[in-house]
Image (spheres, rainbow, N blue to C red):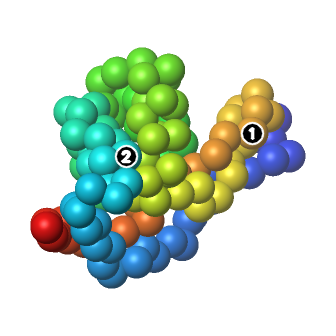
Amino acid sequence: MASLLPTRKPVEHSCSTRTEIVVDGTGSGAALSAIASETAQQILRTLRDGPKPVSAIADDAGTSLQNVRYHIDQLCEAEFVEPVDTWYSEKGRKMTVYGLAVDHLVIRFEP
């Protein structure tokens, strides 16, 4: 029997072309720490292929759902990743689909 809810629909998402972080001691540390971990970097690499729900990100990154959720929260707060759509699992559970919020990141150091 076919599902009444669409399980996966194409996601049209475009990210900003550039984001700049200015490291000057006034709060840039949170953004830098969000991308410092190897897991966060793997999540960003995974999302370069396109938007995905947490379960697909965890599979691609080879880590747990809890670990991905933690890093996704950090990356969303730093505005590197954003929710872009909602899909439904085969069991009808709502899944947030995440995509990159930026295409290029520039880190600039100022005194």
Examine the rendered structure and indicate whether residue 14 appears above or below residue 41: below
Q: Nearer the viewer, residue 96 or 11?
A: 96
Q: Amino acid at mark 2?
A: Ala
Q: Residues within 10 Å of mark 2 (few under 14, many from 20)?
A: few
Is 31 placed left or right of 12 in the picture?
left
Is 84 placed left or right of 27 in the picture?
right
Examine the rendered structure and indicate whether residue 1 appears above or below residue 9: above
Rendering coords of residue 111 (x, y %): 13, 67
Residue 30 visible: yes
Q: Which residue is mark 2?
A: 30
Q: Residue furthest bottom?
A: 17
- The residue tagged with tag 1: helix, strand or loop? strand
* Quadrant in which residue 21 is drawn: bottom left
Q: Residue at x 34, y 21 (%)?
A: 63
Q: Residue at x 42, y 47 (%)?
A: 75
Q: Which residue is mark 1?
A: 94
- The residue tagged with tag 2: helix, strand or loop? helix
Q: Residue at x 38, y 28 (%)?
A: 59
Residue 44 visible: no
Rendering coords of residue 58 (x, y %): 41, 29
Q: Residue at x 34, y 59 (%)?
A: 26
Q: Nearer the viewer, residue 107 or 56?
A: 107
Q: Residues within 10 Å of mark 1 (few under 14, many from 20)?
A: some
